[in-house]
Image (cartoon, rainbow, N blue to C red):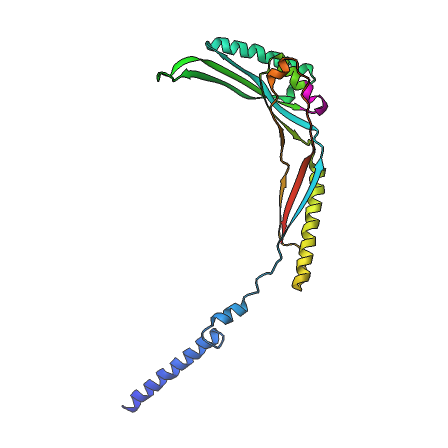
């Protein structure tokens, strides 16, 4: 190999070495990062204790909702509609005489069903059933039984279940929420002590609230019509429950 060729090869080697050195410097001197090194550069995942807490408050209901109305069957549609209309007007008049305002009476179902006879496989139309139901909001629960009985006497022959509720729940929910958070904090403090760690501020809080309605079985319309005593109604108590999950 001539001197000129040897000089060219040496120069190429020197250039390659200089380039490699620059590349290593740009990569932090090692050229390749291992998985462990990359993980060491990543901030530790945040550790947390997650607990649930419950709080509940009992309250006497102050509001009731009852569904009632008429169900009329007749061979002629017009006759069924007319009878249902007259009977329902009498029921509404009874409710208003009992002190129920129009704002607290809401129609929840008006339907017309075609009655058919399939015993002979023909599906012959035998008549029509007209149903007209209203939801009644009653704030004077002490009069609930008498109001229902008056409506039945006036013509209501379809009475649904009664549901009791508390009209203004804000203060009760706040009280249950405070209990739930105190319960969660107590659990977290115990777990932290057992685990040999200390608690910081909550990083997440979620909440669920429930107040299951308390239904009453439907009142037998025929027993009222036959002169039975006013329906005995027990409101009991509603339970307002708040559940929280805190990390």
Q: Quadrant of residue 18?
A: bottom left
Nearest the camera: 124 or 64?
124
x%, y% of residue 83? 54, 9
Q: Is residue 74 above or below residue 60?
A: above
- Residue 24 lies in the magenta stretch: no
Position of residue 116 measured from the top left corner of the image (x, y, whole percent): 41, 16
Image vertical order of residue 124 relative to residue 183, above or below: above
Q: Nearer the viewer, residue 124 or 165?
A: 124
Classify residue 234 by image quadrant: top right
Residue at 53 percent across and 9 percent down: it is 82
User: Percent from the top left, x then y, of residue 65?
Assistant: 63, 26
The answer to whether one can see residue 200 in this image is: no
Q: Is residue 141 magenta?
A: yes
The quadrant of the image that shows the C terminus is: bottom right
- Say which quadrant the N terminus sits in: bottom left
For the stretch drawn in magenta, the main secondary structure is helix
Q: Nearer the viewer, residue 42 or 84?
A: 84
Farthest left residue in view: 1
Residue at the image position 35 percent from the left and 86 percent from the top: 10
Q: Quadrant of residue 7?
A: bottom left
Which residue appears at 71% of the width and 50% of the height?
A: 182
Q: Is residue 146 visible?
A: yes
> In the image, what residue occupies the spot 44% across and 16% down?
114
Q: Which residues are magenta?
A: 138-146
Left or right: 41 in relation to 53 = left
The location of residue 246, given as percent across then percent down, is 63, 51
């Amino acid at each position: 190999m001539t001197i000129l060729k040897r000089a060219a090869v040496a120069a190429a080697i020197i250039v390659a070495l200089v380039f490699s050195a620059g590349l290593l410097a740009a990569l932090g001197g090692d050229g390749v990062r291992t998985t462990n090194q990359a993980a060491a550069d990543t901030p530790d995942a945040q550790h947390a204790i997650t607990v649930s807490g419950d709080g509940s408050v009992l309250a006497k209901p102050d509001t009731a909702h009852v569904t009632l109305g008429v169900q009329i069957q007749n061979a002629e549609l017009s006759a069924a509609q007319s009878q249902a209309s007259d009977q329902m007007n009498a029921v509404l008049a009874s409710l208003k005489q009992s002190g129920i305002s129009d704002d607290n009476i809401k129609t929840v179902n008006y339907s017309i069903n075609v009655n058919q006879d399939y015993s002979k496989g023909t599906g012959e139309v035998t008549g029509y059933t007209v149903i007209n139901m209203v939801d009644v909001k009653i704030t004077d629960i002490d009069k609930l039984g008498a109001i229902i009985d008056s409506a039945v006497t006036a013509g209501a022959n379809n009475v649904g279940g009664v549901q009791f509720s508390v009209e203004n729940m804000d203060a009760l929910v706040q009280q249950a929420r405070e209990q739930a958070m105190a319960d969660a904090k107590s659990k977290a403090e115990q777990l932290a002590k057992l685990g040999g760690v200390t608690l910081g501020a909550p990083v997440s809080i979620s909440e669920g609230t429930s107040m299951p309605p308390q239904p009453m079985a439907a009142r037998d319309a025929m027993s009222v019509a036959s002169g039975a005593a006013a329906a005995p109604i027990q409101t009991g108590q509603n339970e307002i429950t708040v559940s929280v999950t805190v990390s």
